[in-house]
Image (spheres, rainbow, N blue to C red):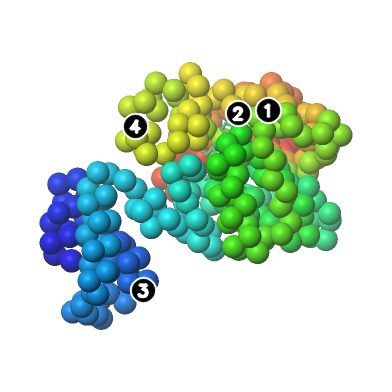
Amino acid sequence: MASARQRLTPTSDTALLDARLLLSFVIDQPTTWLYAHSDSPLTSEQAEKFTHLIEQRTTGMPIAYLTGTRGFYHWDFVVAPDVLIPRPETEHLIEAAQTWLKNRQGEKLNIVDVGTGSGIIAVSLALLFPQASVTAIDVSPAALEIAKLNASRLGAGNIEFRQGNLLSNLPSDFRVDLIAANLPYIDHDEMLTLEVAKWEPHLALDGGIGGLDLIRDLLHQAPVHLKPGGLILLEIGADQGEAARQLALGVFPNATVEVKQDLAGLDRLVIIQC
Ligand SMILES: C[S@@+](CC[C@H](N)C(=O)[O-])C[C@H]1O[C@@H](n2cnc3c(N)ncnc32)[C@H](O)[C@@H]1O
């Protein structure tokens, strides 16, 4: 452990934590197990795998892509370089959806998750609201395969998967109660400077110039499909609250639009009650 930590220190600010996470992955035990068993020897196979993972980590590859999973809300999701690594901030969107949906228990609801990626939003809502019909959309076929895998591993049978550009592949008479989306929202030029862009798909990060291209397009497509009284939940970037509010009011002038902050006090979620 000490040598793994030493090997990671020049390239990671969290060298000890990284080493613990990778070791616990290799031996298939929780990190807490390591504290009581620090002198347990590794098999030669485990030692070789651990060394290989540490070497990969020195290149900057995110831990979640090395271990192939990331926890989100109550569940562990499979992740791979074709999808964004789930972020804890996105749990605010799930909580807002729960608050809205809990008053509609028993109703047969249609929920759409646009830009589903690994499927964290669609699968979480499908599991929390088994009576709902969830549609998970992504433009990336590779992402949809991972989302399908997560749905089947976690037993979410009430999801239909569709490949497409935002809502454009939905039948014109398809009506939705809740549209949830964590679409790419990073400004194109800024994205190119970010460490995450070296590893995570640009398709999951690049929101165009200013970052709001996809959110704007989704809002323009939404009125055809959203039922009267429906809700739209959009994850946004830290400085996009006011711009997103104006975009929402431009399309839904009678809606109530609220911008919520995350635990760091940064704009993170737009709630559009139509
Ligand atoms: C920021 S990631 C979010 C993934 C996942 N929902 C999450 O919260 O972790 C955005 C996702 O939107 C998808 N995407 C990008 N452009 C899209 C488009 N025009 N239509 C549908 N999905 C799109 C990307 O492939 C990516 O999976």
Q: Are marks 1 and 3 in contact (CB under 8 Å)?
A: no
Q: Residue at x 22, y 48 (%)?
A: 58
Along the line of sight, the residue nearer the viewer: 238 or 70: 70
Left or right of 85 on screen, residue 219? right
Q: As drawn, which residue projects farthest toward the front?
A: 45
The local secondary structure at tag 1 comes to helix
- The x, y position of residue 237, in whole percent, is 48, 33
Which one is in front in this view, the residue at disc 2 or the one at disc 4?
4
Of the numbered discs in the image, which one, if any, rests on residue 194? 4
Judging by the rendered image, the residue that carries numbered circle 2 is 215
In terms of sequence position, does the residue under pointer 4 or pointer 1 come before the other?
A: 4
Q: Can you say whether 22 is above or below 260 in the image?
A: below
Name the residue nearer the viewer: 1 or 182.
Answer: 1
Which amino acid type is shown beneath numbered disc 4? Leu
Decide if residue 227 is in sight here.
no
Q: Earlier in the sequence, mark 2 or mark 3?
A: 3
Which picture quadrant has residue 16?
bottom left
Q: CA distance from mark 2 to mark 3?
A: 41 Å
Which residue sits at x=15%, y=47%?
A: 10
- Disc 4 vs disc 1: which is toward the camera? 4
Give the residue type that dot 1 points to. Answer: Leu
Horizontal and vertical percent position of residue 68:
43, 55
Image: 46 above or below 191: below
Q: Amino acid at mark 2?
A: Ile
Q: Which residue is mark 1?
A: 219
Mark 3 = which residue?
A: 29
